[in-house]
Image (cartoon, grey):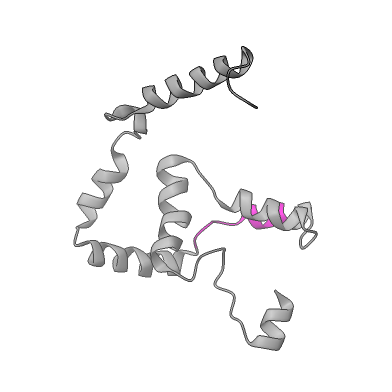
Amino acid sequence: MEVLQNELGWQYYGGKHYESVYTRFMQGYILPTKFGVDKRHGHLSDLIRSGQMTREQALEEIAKPPYPADLFAKDYAFVLKKFGITDEQFQAMMQEPVKTFRDYKNSEWMSRLLRRSITFARRVGLYPR
């Protein structure tokens, strides 16, 4: 990142994909708050594996809040305005139970059937590996 900043004038936005208000809001607030998913874990793991960061540096980073308070207030107002919803409506959505694709009509059964059929066909030599 130093090369990008020094030689090309690149600006760090505070997190991976934080250049978009919507992505920043989703990754910094909605995912960790509603779903318990902190995408920083994966991003920081990538930096550790590539040697760009030590584990200790990553632990320091993960200890920080995912969203700076002043930026959150600004983004929160922006997102609610763009979505055309009130604070009460947004909070009600955040309190709704978490659902998965299994809570809705889907074709998962067909995928499972196809996968099992192919596995069986491979075992008996009818389908190549």
Q: What secondary structure do most residues of the magenta stretch adopt? A: helix
Spot occupied by residue 99 in the image (x, y as percentages of width and height): 34, 33
Q: Nearer the viewer, residue 34 or 42?
A: 42
Would residue 85 appear left or right of 66 to someone viewing this image? left
Q: Nearer the viewer, residue 32 or 1?
A: 1
Would residue 29 appear left or right of 82 to someone viewing this image? right
Q: Residue at horizontal 26%, vertical 62%?
A: 80
Asked if 55 appears above or below 7 in the picture, the reply is: above
Asked if 33 appears above or below 108 in the picture, the reply is: below
Q: Residue at horizontal 58%, vertical 22%?
A: 127
User: How many numbered circles does the render carry?
Assistant: 0
Spot occupied by residue 101 in the image (x, y as percentages of width and height): 35, 33
Spot occupied by residue 46 in the image (x, y as percentages of width and height): 69, 54
Would residue 106 appear left or right of 113 to someone viewing this image? left
The quadrant of the picture occupied by the C terminus is: top right
Spot occupied by residue 52 in the image (x, y as percentages of width and height): 77, 63
Q: Which residues are magenta?
A: 58-67
Q: Nearer the viewer, residue 50 or 83?
A: 50
Asked if 129 appears above or below 28 in the picture, the reply is: above
Taking the magenta stretch, the answer to whether it contains residue 26 is no
